[in-house]
Amino acid sequence: MFRIFSILIFYIFFSVNLNAHVDHNKDLNIIEFDIYRNNEKVGHHKVIFSNKNGIREISTDVFFDIKLLGVSIYKYHSLGKEIYKGNKLIEFKSKTKDGNHNDYCNITNTSSGEYNFDGTTEGKFFKYSSKKDFSLGTWWNHDVLVNNNFVLGQSCRSTETKITFLNKEERMINNKKEIVQLFNVKGEDIDVKIGFTDKTLQWVSMDFSLKGEWNYKLKTLN
């Protein structure tokens, strides 16, 4: 019904290797959005950053609850964790409760440089290995804008996307005026507008239409 977070991706205007821009968020502790549907707050999306002995961990928590006349009719809750050594992704794990479905995605990096993928959604399994560069769909890292070989963080399913730069806008971020780059992402079941700050390339907005109008409103960036 509202299977949306497994289809959102980004793009940027230059190409580099997978995960090469993790350091753009090295000083961040948290990115937090309130999620609105049809101007009603329905949930949150949190990204929490930590460093442990040279290992970078990024945890994501996405939750929303759709209600009709005060009664919950659909819930989504996804928890994920990325682990980086330097700028290299070495492991990713997620578990998602999407309505009545229990989805997961596990990604590991081998000593040969190959990635192993194991995931499932709606009874479909995605298990494969590849040395091909990919973009991981956990939204905070603008590297997912670089490569249209996109891997969904909810299920490990890979898909292809097309991204178009839209424009730049001036917005207030942490009580300061910032220029934000906006992009449109299109693909199979995808039509998303996403925003990153011009100088620091940090994620600050997202909007899309799917059984309603959805808006990510930035709550915390520090």
Image (tube, helix red, strand yellow):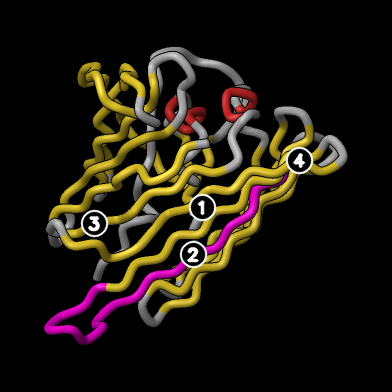
**Whole-Å distance between the Cαs marked 4 and 1?**
21 Å
C-alpha distance separating marks 2 and 4: 22 Å
Q: Amino acid at mark 4?
A: Asn
| Residue bearing the label numbered 4 | 51
Answer whether labels 3 and 2 touch (C-beta < 8 Å).
no
**Which of marks 1 and 3 precedes in the sequence?**
3
Say which of 32 and 164 sits in front: 32
Q: Is residue 90 left or right of residue 137?
A: right
Give the numbered dot on residue 36.
Answer: 3
User: Mark 1 = which residue?
Assistant: 153
Give the mark nearer the N terminus: 2 vs 4: 4
Q: In this picture, which residue range is highlighted in magenta?
A: 66-83
1 vs 2, front mark: 2
Q: Quadrant of residue 207?
A: top left
Which residue is under mark 2? 78
Q: Nearer the viewer, residue 15 or 177?
A: 177
Rendered view: 6 above or below 110: below
Q: Earlier in the sequence, mark 3 or mark 4?
A: 3
Lower sequence index among marks 1 and 2: 2
Q: Name the kind of residue labelled 3 in the image.
A: Tyr
For label 1, the SS is loop
Q: Nearer the viewer, mark 3 or mark 2?
A: 3
Per the image, is 68 magenta?
Answer: yes
Determine the secondary structure under disc 3.
strand
Per the model, the C-alpha gap separating discs 3 and 4 is: 31 Å
Q: Which residue is pictured at 42% across the width and 54% down the height?
A: 45
Query: Between marks 3 and 2, how big is the CA–CA gap?
Result: 17 Å
- Residue 33 against residue 179 in the figure, above or below: below
